Image (cartoon, rainbow, N blue to C red):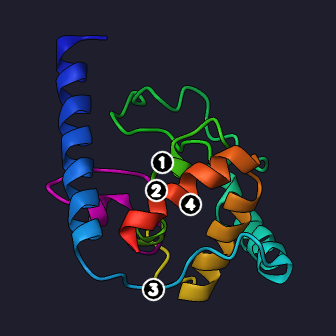
Amino acid sequence: MTRKMFGVLTLALLVIGGVVWQLLEGASATGARLPYDRPESIARGAMIYADNCASCHGENLEGEPNWKQPSPEGLMPAPPHDESGHTWHHPDEVLFQLTKLGTAAVVGQGYESNMPGFSDTLSDQDILDVLGFVKSTWPPEIIEMHNGINAPAS
């Protein structure tokens, strides 16, 4: 990894960390937890995911190849949403905001991303159902860790 690339990645992590801190300090936009244990929400979320997310994040939530390395354009590829990715490292509210507003809007400060916001396409409940579907695919120990991450955020 070049020094410049390391610097860019470090800056991006610092910016994302600041955004996460701000979101955790502020009030919850949804006030709802992900419906990962509600079969009707999971089924609905799976269909919405297939129509809106799978083209980038993969039919099996596997993400794009080399998702930890910037593309030649300097943008980060779509990460996996299965247990091998970092989705479960973020509280519900952060996942909700990233999906609703898009990564660039949430991170700000000129950060660029291919991840669009879905506020004009999906309702808040649609987003919660998609995220609930994603969470429902994680192994029980990952779900338990994610629930622990959410405890301080709620």
Q: Does dot 1 land on a helix, a strand or a loop?
A: helix
CB atoms at circles 2 and 3 under 8 Å apart? no
The residue segment tinted magenta is 99-114
Q: Does dot 3 land on a helix, a strand or a loop?
A: loop
CB atoms at circles 3 and 1 under 8 Å apart? no
CB atoms at circles 4 and 2 under 8 Å apart? yes
Question: Where does the N terminus fall, quadrant-wise?
Answer: top left
Type of the residue with mark 4 = Asn
Residue 132 in magenta stretch: no
Which residue carries the number 3 mark?
Answer: 30
108 sits left or right of 147 in the view:
left
Query: As rendered, which of 30 and 122 lies closer to the eye?
Result: 30
The Cα–Cα distance between marks 3 and 1, rounded to whole angstroms, is 19 Å
Picture coordinates of residue 62, whole percent (x, y): 70, 40
Type of the residue with mark 1 = His
Q: Earlier in the sequence, mark 3 or mark 1?
A: 3
Residue 5 in the image: above or below residue 143: above
Residue 145 in the image: above or below residue 131: above
Type of the residue with mark 3 = Thr
Q: Does dot 4 land on a helix, a strand or a loop?
A: helix
Disc 3 residue crowd, few under 14, some 14–19, many 20+, Cα 10 Å: few
Which residue carries the number 4 mark?
Answer: 147
Q: Residue furthest top?
A: 2
The Cα–Cα distance between marks 4 and 3, rounded to whole angstroms, is 16 Å
- Does the rendering let one see residue 61? no
Residue 149, disc? 2
